Image (cartoon, coloured by chain):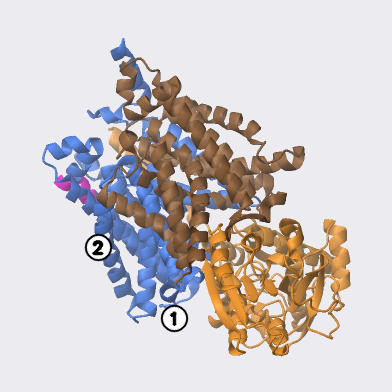
Chain colours: A orange, B blue, C brown
Amino acid sequence: MVKTTRVRAGLAILAVVSLALGACSKDEEPAKNASGPIKIGISLPLTGDFSEPGKGIKEGYELWAETVNASGGMLGRQVELIFRDDASDPNRVVSDYESLITQDKVNLVFGPFSSRLVIPAAQVAEDNTMLFVEPAGAAKEVFTQGFKYLFYAAPAVANDHYNYLAEYILALPADQRPKTAAYASLDDPFAKGTAYGLRDKLAAGGIKTVADEVYPPENTDFAAIAARIASKKPEIFVGGTQFEDSVGMLRALQELKVQPKLVAFSTGPTLPEFPEAVKGASEGVLSPVGWALNATYPTNKEFVEAHKKKFGKEPSEDQANGFTVGQVVAAAVKAVGCADPTKDCQTKLAEHIRGGKFDTVVGPLSFDDNGRPEQAHMIQQYIKGKVEIVLPKSSAVQTAELLFPKPAW
Amino acid sequence: MTGLGRRFGKPALVLLGAALIASYPWLVPNSYLVYAGVLTMMFAGLATSWNLVGGFTGYVSLGHSAFFGLGAYGTGLLITRAGWPWVLSIVAAGLGVGVFAVIVGIAAMRVRGASFVIVSIALVAAVNLLAQGWRSLTGGSVGLRVPTQYGELTRLEAHYLFFYLFMGLLALTLLTWWFMDRSRFGTGLKAIREDEDKAESLGVPTAGFKVVAFALSALFVAFGGGLYAVWFRNLDPIFVFSILIGSYMVLMSLLGGVRYLFGPLLGAAIVAPAGEFFLLRLGETQIHLTAMGLLLGVVVLFMPEGIIPAVAKLFGLRRPPAASIREDTAEQRATLEEAAVQ
Amino acid sequence: MPSGSLLLQGLALGVLTGGLYALLSSGLSLYFGVMRVVMVAHPAFLFLAAYLTYSLHNKAGLDPLLTILVTVPLFFAAGVAIQRLLIARLAAETMAMMSVLLTFAMALVIEGTLGAVYTGSFRSINPEYATKSLDLFGTQLPYDRLIGFGMAALTLAALFVLLKVTRFGRSLRATIQHPQAARLVGIKTERVTGLGFGVGLATAAVGGAVLAIITPFFPAAHWAWIGKLMAIIVVGGLGSVQGAAIAALLLGVVESLVLVTVDATWATMMFYIFLFLTLLVRPQGFFGGRLAQRF
């Protein structure tokens, strides 16, 4: 008797649930709301390993939205940003974009942070034929997946970040030019990519690679790696690093008393916390950077001022990258005249970006067929405790001469 | 109460439940919810597979995601390097992982209890390291990309397909659990859970049985990994080899009840959406981790038998306490002990 | 062929790191010994201590090493509380599974709270001596590592004295060896277990302070340490603090030597290779003596 009741209860529950679900029918048509705010969907790593830069990019996006809305919005409509946290997890980032596109039916999407997250996220956008301009996926693998809607909104891809430095080194007269170089990279597609780009160019130019270390992301002990490098006494040291590993590596090199003539780290030195973290040792450290505080590109000064007003601090590269994404997309939307999540509109936007040239806070940007930007990163150096742009020489952005050889630690 | 109702009541309920679940993709309004359904289905299968060894033998493996990742990478590599068709790759990779699990199991199951847990953690950490370190084979931290094997299908159609594929795998795993539960093999395993030394002295081939259970469990988890590789197409070693996935399997089984056929499935149906919910509501900071942690803590402290017994109690359907002393709560035993000491 | 000086440098660094590992894993041995608890949250507590050290250093200007005067009693009390209020509720038969999950839950709660309070930024303490090193016949001994080693040695020495000489220590060892027998001779095992847990967590307080000086940290940093520390205590012998210390030194040196001669991946892999060797050859660990448990 109890079992009949249970069966009946179970059937009743099932019936109610299926009715409730059945009431929703599949709604696969993308919304074509011609009025109302333009919704832009974004997934960022606000927690987890990439949360620091993730927040920086979020600030860049927010500032852009505020700026655009203050001058009337896009196509006369206000811009609304919808953020999701992907916790630096590739599964989540796919979840987020899938829900933003098919559930929230956003008009546009902006990209997340890190090449690791960009690739799966771009897959979602591509499958839904949505434009995907992203601020931080620069590894070469990003551009070899056959994505037709993806664009990286910064001057150069990972392997080309150090191009100006390679040029400079190889152009030194033979008696001054260093002969040996050591590399230590984080096993991350972007970080490694930057170091390897420089390594390949220098090796082709005759500079011997005496050490080529790669360490896993969890590695916190750089002393032993530094010991290996110390034993080779390299004249150049290049760190394919991200954040704290640049600090750890630099400290370890100091402890092991390595004194190269030229030292470069990717990413780390471009962060405002770097000089404090390494105390006086930042002097002479080089780093590729896509954006410079004092660059005179149109819109940069306004960007810096607006950022200081909104956040009370100066922007750094992450905020600039976010802002640039917004600028590129806004220009495309304005030119093409639509902002719908339809295949037709998104394809037109993508084609426009592919063929166009855009004025952004990181300078003029143009892209190749695979979404790679075609410009080059600048090289910054800490001179007397300040960040100076030292390369490209004799350009509008240079603020000081490159200090070589580096003063001893 | 008619004989018909008694005879067909439970299986009918199961079939109806299965039908409802199968109709889920058709009933939800957008692609994202189908995607979420695929993930939940996958976790249900993984948790049920984990339960083949965890629930039956009591050996808690926190490192089961090692087999998930190996199945995924194995499948991916067979597809990309050897050019095999994807179905064959999944099966072959799964079988390979099963054999690997036998070898690992023989070594790992020489220790029990907490030591075994530690060993399982070390296993997944080691495999993670290997996957990231052997760059020439696996692509290192960059991960492995599996080209789309179902070119003509749209993204939504692919979600449908894999929903049913994962459901099929789940059904297979459930069937295996069901058969094991009724077999002498299963009884032997449960004896190991209750008291391994006594079981051995009674003639149960404990070493062999537990390794077989371990390998079976690894096999199905590896199949899940293979399906995931073909569906998701982006394998990130830090994700597929993480302790978190292994912990989810354990949490889901625990929450649903490790002694019940549908326990892990139920647990998955609760935990997977709960995770999404926490992330959506609280995702601005890491506090969503705290929420998950608290949920897990509450389950462990107050519902260690799982949700099914707790809910069944509500409907007045609790079976009388079984004869095994393992059913006593800590309080009951403490009372007994106190009495004994006096 | 790596040069002699490189090997010597590797050896030196390995010994220093091994000392640190010994400090960090000593607590783990205690938890396991007294209650067969796999305390997955120990590294999380380490970093909680590191964050507290960081805050105390920045807000109150305390030297990082002095902060342990605050954190050690705090963590001791917390350890006792955790054992009495949470762990003691778990049933003994399913202790393995439940304690892992419960402590895993604790780790998540800690990580979430740290992230919410401190954000995901990398934090570090950069004392003046952070980049200086002692030059010993051409081998560099970084000051921060030396200090870490010193703290580890002091703490372990204190722990040994506690365990071998004091009455409490004897009770603790008895409880580890055989809880029922201990009860039979009148030892109040519940109390001893709680205090043992407290001691274990107190070592985490010291370990965290040392970590804060040596390396930058972030809320999710603890995951990387679980595998290594677990491997150490298995190789050393579960439940034996001295076993863990010896294994830690050994593995620290091995890791460092492999790191300077091969690469980082193989170096970390050595932990797991040793673990599996232990399982195959001598599951109760190599250095544990009578306290080492197999299960």
Q: Which residues are magenta?
A: B178-185
Are labels 2 and 1 on one chain?
Answer: yes
**Secondary element type, mark 2:** helix
Vertical arrangement, residue C56 with respect to residue B32, above or below = above
Of tags 2 and 1, which is closer to the observer? 2
Q: Position of residue C241 (x, y in %)?
A: 42, 37
Give me the disc on residue A383. Answer: none
Q: Is residue B119 or residue A362 the one in the foreground?
A: B119
Vertical arrangement, residue A270 with respect to residue C78, above or below = below
Residue bearing the label numbered 2 = B99
**Secondary element type, mark 1:** loop
In magenta segment, residue A150: no
Residue C126 visible, this angle:
no
Q: Is residue A397 or residue A279 the one in the foreground?
A: A279
Q: Position of residue A275 (x, y in %)?
A: 76, 60
Instruction: Give the residue at the far top of this rendering.
Output: B342
Whole-number angstrom distance, CA of label 2 to CA of label 1: 35 Å
Q: Amino acid at mark 2?
A: Val
* Quadrant in the picture for the C terminus of chain C: top left
* Chain of the residue on which disc 2 is drawn: B
Say few, some or many: other residues with alpha carbon within 10 Å of mark 2 (under 14 / 14 to 19 / 20 or more).
some
Residue bearing the label numbered 1 = B152
* Quadrant in the picture for the N terminus of chain C: bottom left
Q: Amino acid at mark 1?
A: Glu
Vertical arrangement, residue A350 with respect to residue A40, above or below = below
Q: Position of residue A115 (x, y in %)?
A: 59, 71
